[in-house]
Image (spheres, helix red, strand yellow):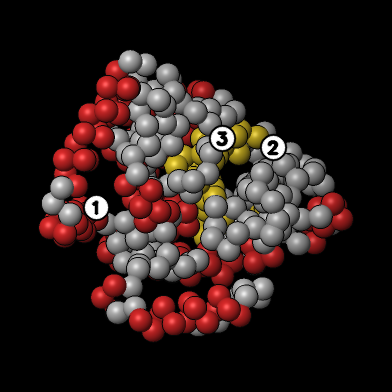
Amino acid sequence: MAYPAGVPAELQEKLQLLQKQEGDAEKSKPSVQPYEVSPLLRDTIDELDMWGNLREIQEKGYTVLTNVAPPEFIEDFCAAVRRVGSGQNKLHLDPTFVDAACNRKVYALAEFMCGQRPLLSQFAMSIKEQGKPGDPLLPPMHSDQFWVPTPFPEHNQLLTCCWALDGEFTAESGATHVVPGSHRLRRHPTKHEIKHDRELLQPTSGPRGCVVCWDGSVWHSGGVRLIPGQRVVAHVTYSRIGMRPLESYVGFMPKETISANPRLASLLGHTLDNFFENTPTRPFQFLKFEQLKRISQSTYDKAGFKKELADYAKEFLKNNPSAIKTFMKENMRKAQERSKL
């Protein structure tokens, strides 16, 4: 195994010895690597025929999803965006917005790019009027993970999915422009590069209802509509489970809506796992460390994890029969302490 520069030679020797001693059956599951498809996701990618999209976003930093939703849904989605208007924090304002955020094909790409249980970071809409040649591209060329320092992590952190709602996505209709391959630079564009953005940017394209998706590192900009009509799009941004979302819908989404939609609950962080934002009355449980670690590595299998814990508990109690009494006493003590808060 090759070690990164700076790892002490003594540590390398110790690790190599431990790796030789480690049996194949006991080897810990490695994290899914950048652009590697988790075995738990493969069947979904097969079913949705998305392998070409995965290759494209790995190579170019963006891809165009087609046949994502029926034409009537796109009509309803577009009408809802026109009714609500441009802006952010819009998820709770129409049922079609929730359906779009939870779309199976888009969600599968979000899981591929952002790992298991991605979060909804932002739901925003944009309506632009017809412009003219020479108008500046707005917003200026940028990468979406602007609060991540450079060099960007090798694992992608964000995925933005732009729904083209008003018609075909072309350079003339105001399609999003990207710099293919710029995600490999793992940095923000410089001021000089932004000044010369038209020398770098290329328009995306796709039929009405397509979803143009790009990773958090790729450089891109909005387009200028040069034909009559409006440019109507919705941007849905997903992030890794360990990243803080840009938007919060606490108190805005009915609890019944969330509980009836497991995918929405997961996207909003409303699960029963209680990984984050714990309180004195709801403290973090130690086993959650291992569960959260595996989710962040895209290796978490719920059934397998439960069996693993059960097998470990049986073996532990077999070797430590008095431990159960100590465990129960400690749990009772903690419960009593919480009841006093």
Helix, strand or loop for disc 1: helix
Label 2: which residue? 130
| On screen, residue 282 above or below 208 | above
Dot 1 amino acid type: Lys
Residue 85 figure quarter: top right
Quarter of the picture containing the C terminus is: top left
- Give the left or right position of residue 142, taking residue 56 as reference: right
What residue appears at the point 37 percent right and 32 percent down from the top-left corner?
Answer: 283
Front: mark 3 or 2: 3
Determine the residue located farthest toward the front in the rendered image: 322
Dot 3 amino acid type: Leu
Between discs 3 and 2, the one toward the N terminus: 2
| On screen, residue 236 above or below 26 | above
Label 1: which residue? 302
Between discs 1 and 3, the one toward the N terminus: 3
Between discs 2 and 1, the one toward the N terminus: 2
**Numbered-mark total:** 3
Graded by Cα atoms within 10 Å as few (under 14), some (14 to 19) or many (20 or more), the crowding at tag 2 reads some
Label 3: which residue? 246
What residue appears at the point 19 percent right and 36 percent down from the top-left corner?
Answer: 328
Dot 2 amino acid type: Gln
Helix, strand or loop for disc 2: loop
Graded by Cα atoms within 10 Å as few (under 14), some (14 to 19) or many (20 or more), the crowding at tag 1 reads few
Graded by Cα atoms within 10 Å as few (under 14), some (14 to 19) or many (20 or more), the crowding at tag 3 reads some
| On screen, residue 340 above or below 117 | above
Residue 332 figure quarter: top left
Front: mark 1 or 3: 1
